[in-house]
Amino acid sequence: MTTATPVVVVSRVDDVTADAVTEELNRRRVPVVRLDPGDFPGDLSVAARLDEDGMRGYARTRTRVADLDRVRSVYWRRPRPYTAPSGTGEQDARWAREEARYGLGGVLASLPGAHYVNHPWRNRDAEYKPAQLTVAARCGFSVPPTLLTNDETAARDFIREHGSVVYKPLRSTDYFSADGRALTVWVEEVAPTELNAGIAHTMHLFQKRVRSVADLRVTAVGEGVFTVRIDGSPGLDWRRHYDILSYSLIETPPDLAKSVRRYLNAFGLVFGAFDFGMDRDGRIWLYECNPNGQFAWFPEPITGRIVTAVADQLQHAGEHRAR
């Protein structure tokens, strides 16, 4: 079945955030084609023709077909990695995956006239924490003193200068124990005695600890800015304690909202999930911005309000451009 002017949702099956937005679009009777590049080539086929008139063609799943030149908007969430057919030799599989990445990935990133939330290349650019913090400072956010280094002496000097310092991973990368269990690297305070020559093996991010009295998750969708105050975390990283925390939707300080919009514009983003800590003096410190952060874990009505804002972006993108 060919779907007219659809919203294309690009994500894996087990994505509750994409599920919530898709359900809202379905409720509004907005046509949706959901696909996962990780299903290519087995359950996803694509034919894209390019000439002086632009791009035409289709993307076909087992149940839906989207005309590439009629896509209204794209919700780029969390697709699985590109794959090769089972039984393919290692070298051929590597070649096939890269051809899929640059071929299929290039097609999905170049849909004519489509409105992206967010464009995958903008997501990629905005994932680098050094870039995030540099741009954040220019946009008026308070940024904790930060060190990126593989030099043990520099790390020791930084701790000596700032006293209480935390370590943060630069990216969420799959890491497994010897028995195959998935492990998570959390934000942790670092003592000088814990530093060793292993720092030289790769880059590390150290940051002055913010003595926070509350955390803030600010989710921005276009012009909408939703600020959730998070209380009750017994440790540094509130993500370890979702179930015991309290969440309150609060008024966004005007200066914070302005900085958020400047930041989105700097990276060419429509959506961003910002994490902040608020100290005893009420100063708000930016930790990071996830350009593709999740939000469906919030209690209602918080999740519903963000879902509505995302669905509005996806549904009305074409009409907005036409005016």
Image: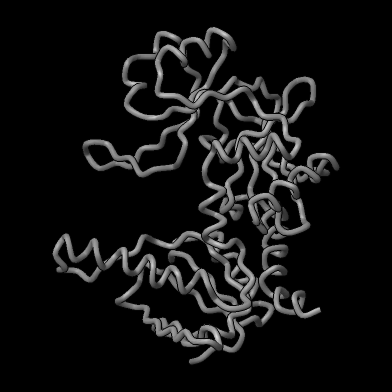
Question: Does any portion of residue 64 appear in the rendered image?
Answer: no
45 up-or-down from 175: above or below: below
Question: Does any portion of residue 253 appear in the rendered image?
Answer: yes
Point out residue 155 in the picture as x, y percentages from the top left corner.
46, 16
How many numbered badges does the structure rendering display? 0
Question: Of 297 and 80, which appears nearest the observer?
Answer: 80
Report whether 146 appears left or right of 104.
Answer: right
Point out residue 138 in the picture as x, y percentages from the top left corner.
71, 37
95 up-or-down from 228: above or below: below
Residue that appears at 63% across and 79% down: 72
Question: Of 277 and 228, which appears nearest the observer?
Answer: 277
Point out residue 65 in the picture as x, y percentages from the top left corner.
47, 86
Residue that appears at 79% across and 20% down: 281
Report whether 143 appears left or right of 32.
Answer: right
Question: Of 290 and 17, which appears nearest the observer?
Answer: 290
Residue found at the very far right of the displayed protein = 254
Q: Quadrant of the C terminus?
A: bottom right
323 up-or-down from 244: above or below: below
Residue that appears at 65% across and 81% down: 30
Residue found at the very far front of the displayed protein = 52
Report whether 250 appears left or right of 110.
Answer: right
28 up-or-down from 252: above or below: below
Residue that appears at 62% across and 63% down: 117
Point out residue 79 in the picture as x, y percentages from the top left corner.
44, 62
Report whether 251 appears left or right of 287.
Answer: right
Q: Based on the displayed image, in which of its 4 quarters is residue 218 positioned? A: top right
